[in-house]
Amino acid sequence: MAASPYRILFMGTPAFAVPSLQALLDHGEEVVAVVTQPDRPKGRGRKLAPPPVKELALAHGLPVLQPTKIRTAEFLDELRAFNADLFVVTAYGRILPGPLLNLPRLGTINVHGSLLPKYRGAAPIQWAILRGEQETGITIMQMDEGMDTGDILLPRALAITPEDTAATLAARMAALGGQTLIEALDLLKAGKLPRQPQDHSLATDAPPLTKEMGVIDWQRSARDLSCLIRGLDPWPTAHAVLNGETIRLFKPAVVTAAVPDPPGTVIRADKAGLLVATGEALLQVGELQRDGGKRLPAADFLRGYPIAPGSRFIS
């Protein structure tokens, strides 16, 4: 006999959270309401746009709450009225207070984008790439009032490929997050979900990204720069100055070879991309973008903006 569905209140905002909500719906859980961030201005017209989670919730006729303040007695009362067994959080975007986390009888669980205790914080997917990790994953955790400090319930690993960007890795991790969430709920219903306190001595941080991080230092190795470019794609992007103009760089590959010229020097520029000297090995760049222009494959970019070998990027 199948276990009864849980009454679940879901909290999430961006595209990363959509597979988690979809998995709950597909699995037959009773999603009683969805809490998401307020609509935000988007695009050139700055029109208000709903978060991706709101769009999915409305498509399924679910009640949607978009509070501007979450630390109020009124909001707690509003949540209490749904009589949820469990709160599930995936990338909601705010730190949740203890009274809210402890409101349902089973507490609150989180779908977190790293193998905790590594990469606690706002940007775990990006930092795993930035730091050159070869593996990351999803952790289902029991939330407490700390920043991703709660007990580990169910981790699942995922390999990072040399071509992964923050965007491609996030898409795969979002799907894994939905799958792992359902696996954890099934174990919870069977009374078999493990619970392991984190080893806080092994914790690392994943703070928010900043635009300043995107400045390329060509003295670094090609491997480091590949991690930087991929980890900051699609935002805030990595960039360097060439002939007085800021150029954003994408789709890097490391070419193991001797460095014949000073770091930042363009060795070759053709349809395969730019080949640039670094502090160690060479970096091939497959896509580029000028300020105000479109992101283009190297062949298309170079037709409109020729770059001569011997030209030199500066940070």
Image (cartoon, rainbow, N blue to C red):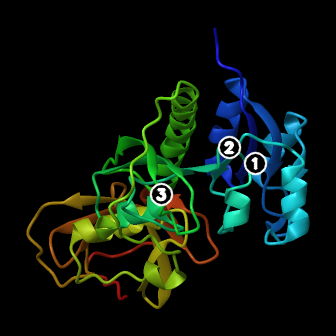
Q: Where is residue 172 in the image (x, y as percent from the top left)?
A: 49, 42
Q: In which quarter of the image is residue 45?
A: bottom right
Q: How crowded is mark 3: few (under 14 residues within 10 Å), some or many (20 or more)?
A: many
- For mark 3, give the secondary structure: helix
- In what quadrant of the picture does the C terminus appear? bottom left
**Amino acid type, callout 2:** Val
Q: In which quarter of the image is residue 62?
A: top right
**Amino acid type, callout 3:** Ala
Q: Where is residue 124 in the image (x, y as percent from the top left)?
A: 46, 62
Q: Name the residue under label 2.
A: 18
Asked whether residue 250 is in view, the answer is no
Q: Distance between the residues labelled 3 and 2?
A: 17 Å
Q: Where is residue 23 in the image (x, y as percent from the top left)?
A: 65, 32
Please state which of the two labelled residues, at mark 3 or mark 2, is closer to the viewer.
2
The single residue placed furthest to the top in the displayed view is 1
| Circle nearer the N terminus (3, 1) | 1
Report whether 14 appears left or right of 123.
right
Report whether 172 appears left or right of 119.
right
Q: Name the residue under label 3.
A: 166
Report whether 73 appears left or right of 128.
right
- For mark 2, give the secondary structure: helix
Q: Residue at x 36, y 42 (%)?
A: 157
Q: Name the residue under label 1.
A: 53
